[in-house]
Amino acid sequence: GFRMGIVGLPNVGKSTLFNALTRTAAAQAANFPFCTIEPNVGEVAVPDARLDRLAEIAKSKQVIPTRMTFVDIAGLVKGASKGEGLGNQFLANIRETDAIAHVLRCFEDGDVTHVEGRVDPVADAETIETELMIADLESVERRMANLVRKLKGGDKEAVEQQRLLEAAKAALEAGRPARTVQVADEDRRAWRMLQLLTAKPVLYVCNVEEGSAATGNSQSAKVAEMAAAQGNAHVVISAKIEEEIAQLDPEEQEMFLEEMGLEEAGLDRLIRAGYELLNLQTYFTAGPKEARAWTIAKGTLAPQAAGVIHGDFEKGFIRAETIAFDDYVALGGESAAKEAGKMRAEGKGYEVKDGDVLHFLFNT
Ligand code: GDP
């Protein structure tokens, strides 16, 4: 599955957000740094109104959303890259994620200590990015040192790695994160293998006070500007509100959101933004037994998409029968769509589209 790491300085609201996301009290929020020592891992349903629509039409007994994993990663402070505090474990935890949700404190609250003694989310973002860049630079240099012998032996793979490492090093030494390096398609695999922290896509999460959840505040506006300049995404949420919302039942939630002037829960926006960030899309399977959403990377071909359900589907893949979501809904279901000629048979080379309703045929 896909993993989002939640990072940020202490006391910015990471645990509060994680709790809200996973609706558990497992990650405890407390008003002092380092309270969450072990990374907390939680699975979150990806909200998708299309799935409910399909389930309604197909009269499915069960509705199973697709899921995304969030990891609450505590312990990043200034100097983390030097192994102070919880640095090293922390960096290892980030390495295992596909993308980073970087929580920035945009709320003022005299009762909640800020590690730097002031609220400045743009400076905080730089603090964290700098730590990650230092860690990356060290890892790049370590890898280069390990390559020396192979390079002398003329190892082709080593030459390629060296070239990518040099590109990363140049960017990092110029104070730019590794994600700013232009990587050719054929190098992508090798690039990912370098596991650079600052190569991961970033989503800034502006944690604003309750009253600014719908509008944002002057601090989140600065983050928005920074994010746009970097080409990164951002969302504005109030972790406190989300924590409250997460404890309500669905009807109460709707009333609460309306009162707050919010169209939907910030968490739903956050999860979807993460989905976008990871370049993911959804296809569906729908029948009387269950309607289910499945996550694939954009550009995934039909056999690999089938493989997400079961390895045998991929191995024995014959073809996929597909109906576009809009056709499925407009025509009122599978048989009607089929009669109208909207069900297509697609082969191994078919690139699955977002919203496809699929059946796979396969050899066992
Ligand atoms: P972490 O160290 O980043 O995981 O931060 P926590 O989630 O533990 O939050 C630290 C403190 O800030 C807790 O006392 C939270 O209740 C509080 N906090 C989190 N978000 C908000 C917010 O939006 N507004 C206010 N006033 N306090 C918040």
Image (tube, helix red, strand yellow):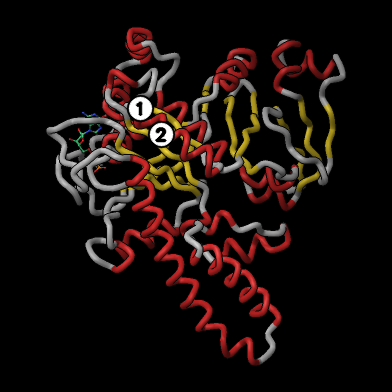
Q: Is 351 in front, or is 197?
A: 197
Residue for point 39% across, 43% down: 102
C-alpha gap between disc 1 and disc 2: 7 Å
Label 2 crowd bin: few (<14), some (14–19), many (20+), radius 10 Å:
some
Cβ atoms at labels 1 and 2 below 8 Å apart: yes
Classify 330 as above or below 100: above
Place of residue 342 in the rendered image (x, y in percent of width and height, measured from the top left): 83, 20
Which residue reaches farthest right? 341
Secondary structure at badge 2 equals helix
Q: Position of residue 178 (x, y in %)?
A: 53, 59
Q: Amino acid at mark 2?
A: Lys
- In the rendered structure, find residue 66 and report the number of the disc placed on it: none
Q: Which mark is residue 218?
A: 1
Tell me if I can see residue 41 in this picture.
Answer: no
Which residue is located at x 55 percent, y 54 percent?
A: 179
Residue 91 sits in which quadrant? bottom left
Crowd around label 1: few <14 · some 14–19 · many ≥20 (10 Å): few
Q: Amino acid at mark 1?
A: Ser
Q: Position of residue 185 (x, y in %)?
A: 72, 57
Give the residue at x 32% y 25%. 242
- The residue tagged 2 is 222
| Quadrant of the rendered image holding ligand 1 | top left
Residue 58 position by quadrant: top right
Q: Is residue 113 left or right of residue 191?
A: left
